């Protein structure tokens, strides 16, 4: 009898049946052989709590009452057996002090006695209990003692297999490098979420921005250190919400806490700030950076839709606002489609050589002298000339922005060479450079090499940047690059001043030669005393810091006169000329030389008749 019981259960274990199925079969086999016995199998977890695994002859409410009960010396027969690690027989439940608190459970079921035996693993640790309940007060029989030995052995095997299987499942759902739940665990979590309540949960997807650079520069050991650092910071800051590593440089945070759901942008900011803390690796300081996109569950949406929405937001952030968080909004897909269309349009224009610089003159407001140009990117489309504002979306793509910079610089250098050959070269030509130009680490080679190839002295080019480019990355890359260029003889202009971070204190640290006051201030000069006060303040500070000031967007003589009266030296705008092509700029330079043949030491005309220069 004992052999058949053992063989039946071992066969079930060998086929890979789960613990509940094995235990249920064992209980039924026991009760088949011992009709007066009700068999119960319980697990004991690492915290010492009881959990029913199988008890086919017991009602659900009884099993539920036992679930989570803490073992102890006076917790029925099973709790005592597990606590002491020894068999415990209650030959009369009604009179046993161990059962005094549980008689309301046992009496309706006519449970009069119980014999409980601890299940132990190979290390002697209690992992469960097998209990035989009787309908009359009594203890175990010799047959029951033989059968219980078989039951304990079989249950020990089944529990160990269940623990091993659980470890394998857990290992399969954990990332080996970081210990975070992996993509499989993430998919499981998403499938278990309730999607019926809009805003009830959300998702933030995070990508490390510089993992490839670290891997390529310092090796994969440093890259792994960066990943583990980011994972640890992410998990700590996400709590009580859970973080996952989806693979490579991708992470996810499942938002369920009320605080995070109330303000996901703030939660994302804290996550990105935490990741950005420096990490030391073999005497090197690595500075992690990340970008995030997120979405909350909406009306009628599935978990997969939320994931796709968060992915769209992350992609948008990486392409347009790297280093920040973008939250999904319904129009984001349309916005991205327009951006992709703009990118394709610019790529076609580059391939067909339809991108070219147009030049807007910069004049000395007192003398009318043409002192330089700003080179503005234009796209030719048939008979139309399209301004950069119409394809601005394309410039948020780093690759496209770099290609535009290459083409513009090549064209500007060629025009400067031609003007030098004619002896009419302007003092300088300003050209705008983007954040990706600086952070791509190529400008120090690109600009000198391009100008040298055309034989153009470096001092003819002025680098124009915006406050957003200068301060938007939170590091010193841009400032260091600008200082290096100034040491090589180039000048730097701060473009669109007042539209970015707009703090006068930033001027103390900006290595610039010119400040270009944004058109929005020029527009308000005559109507708004505050605007005039700001411009006058900038002029005063610039004078103290030995910087020149150029007013952009000068459109009326009244504006020009007011700017002259408050001490602004230079102006740029439609009053003098719109942006013009290279041929028209060449005519303007020839006219300036003809009107004022005396040249300054740098080759600039020194005449005083703006009308002759412009017309």
Image (cartoon, helix red, strand yellow):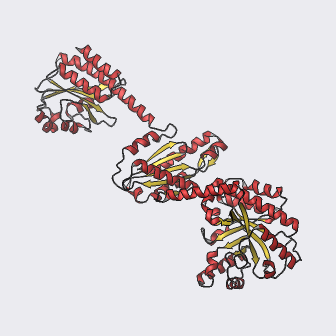
Could you say where residue 353 lies in the image, as x and y percent from the top left?
A: 72, 57
Query: Which quarter of the figure has residue 599?
Result: bottom right
Tell which of 371 and 232 is nearer to you.
371
Could you say where residue 399 lies in the image, as x and y percent from the top left?
A: 65, 53
Tell which of 320 and 119 is nearer to you.
320
Give left or right: position of 10 versus 179.
Answer: left
Query: Is 52 drawn above or below residue 250 in the view shown?
Result: above
The residue drawn where x is 69% and y is 58% is 404
Query: Is 119 drawn above or below residue 203 in the view shown?
Result: above
Q: How many marks?
A: 0
In what quadrant of the picture does the N terminus appear?
top left
Query: Which quarter of the figure has residue 526?
Result: bottom right
Residue 597 visible: yes
Could you say where residue 571 lies in the image, as x and y percent from the top left?
A: 72, 77
Tell which of 577 and 27 is nearer to you.
577
Query: Which quarter of the figure has residue 394?
Result: bottom right
The residue drawn where x is 83% and y is 55% is 453
Query: Is 203 drawn above or below residue 578 in the view shown?
Result: above
Give left or right: position of 225 versus 187.
Answer: right
Give left or right: position of 528 versus 540.
Answer: left
Give left or right: position of 387 versus 453.
Answer: left
Residue 322 visible: no
In what quadrant of the picture does the C terminus appear?
bottom right
The residue drawn where x is 31% and y is 22% is 12
């Amino acid at each position: 009898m004992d052999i058949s019981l053992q063989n039946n259960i071992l066969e079930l274990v060998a086929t890979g049946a789960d613990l509940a199925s094995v235990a249920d079969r064992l209980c039924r086999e026991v009760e088949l052989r011992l009709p007066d016995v009700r068999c119960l199998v319980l697990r004991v977890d690492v915290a010492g709590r009881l959990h029913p695994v199988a008890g086919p002859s017991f009602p659900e409410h009884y099993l539920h009452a036992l679930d989570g009960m803490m073992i102890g010396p006076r917790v029925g027969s099973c709790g005592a057996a597990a606590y002491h690690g020894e068999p415990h027989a209650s030959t009369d439940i009604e009179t046993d002090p161990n059962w005094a608190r549980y008689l309301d459970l046992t009496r309706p079921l006519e449970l009069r006695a119980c014999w409980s035996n601890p299940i132990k693993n190979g290390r002697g640790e209690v992992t469960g209990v097998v209990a035989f309940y009787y309908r009359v007060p009594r203890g175990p029989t010799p047959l029951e003692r033989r059968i219980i030995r078989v039951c304990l052995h079989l249950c020990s095997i089944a529990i160990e297999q269940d623990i091993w299987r659980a470890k394998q499942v857990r290992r399969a759902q954990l990332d080996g490098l970081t210990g975070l739940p992996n993509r499989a665990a993430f998919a499981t979590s998403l499938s278990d979420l309730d999607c019926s309540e809009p805003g009830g949960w959300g998702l933030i997807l995070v990508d490390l921005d510089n993992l490839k650079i670290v891997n390529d520069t310092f090796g994969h050991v440093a890259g792994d250190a960066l990943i583990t650092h980011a994972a640890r910071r992410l998990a700590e800051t996400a709590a009580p919400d859970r973080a996952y590593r989806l693979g490579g440089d991708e992470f996810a945070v499942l938002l369920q806490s009320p605080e995070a759901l109330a303000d996901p942008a703030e939660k994302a900011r804290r996550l990105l700030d935490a990741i950005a803390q420096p990490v030391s690796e073999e005497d090197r300081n690595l500075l992690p950076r990340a970008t995030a996109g997120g979405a909350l569950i909406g009306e009628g949406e599935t978990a997969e839709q939320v994931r796709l929405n968060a992915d769209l937001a992350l992609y948008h952030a990486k392409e347009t606002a790297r280093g920040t968080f973008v939250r999904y909004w319904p129009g984001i897909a349309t916005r991205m489609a327009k951006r992709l269309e703009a990118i394709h349009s610019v790529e076609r224009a580059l391939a067909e050589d339809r991108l070219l610089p147009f030049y807007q003159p910069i004049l000395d407001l007192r003398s009318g002298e043409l002192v330089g140009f700003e080179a503005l990117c234009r796209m030719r489309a048939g008979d139309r000339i399209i301004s950069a504002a119409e394809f601005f979306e394309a410039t948020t793509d780093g690759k496209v922005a770099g290609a535009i910079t290459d083409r513009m610089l090549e064209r500007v250098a060629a025009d400067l060479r031609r003007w030098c050959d004619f002896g009419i070269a302007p003092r300088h030509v300003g050209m705008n450079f983007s954040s990706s130009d600086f952070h791509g680490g190529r400008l120090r080679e690109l600009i000198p090499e391009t100008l040298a190839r055309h034989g153009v002295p470096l001092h003819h080019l002025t680098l124009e940047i915006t406050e957003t480019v200068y301060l938007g990355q939170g590091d010193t890359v841009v400032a260091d690059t600008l200082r290096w260029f100034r040491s090589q003889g180039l000048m730097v202009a701060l473009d669109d001043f007042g539209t970015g971070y707009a703090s006068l204190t930033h001027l103390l640290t900006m290595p610039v030669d010119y400040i270009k006051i944004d058109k929005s201030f020029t527009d308000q000069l005559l109507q708004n005393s505050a605007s005039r006060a700001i411009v006058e303040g900038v002029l005063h500070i610039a004078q103290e810091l030995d910087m020149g000031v150029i007013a952009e967007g000068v459109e009326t003589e009244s504006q020009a006169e007011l700017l002259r009266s408050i001490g602004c030296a230079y102006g740029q705008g439609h009053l003098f000329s719109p942006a013009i092509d290279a041929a028209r700029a060449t005519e303007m330079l020839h006219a300036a030389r003809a009107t004022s043949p005396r040249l300054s030491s740098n080759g600039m005309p020194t005449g005083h008749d703006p009308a002759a220069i412009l017309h």
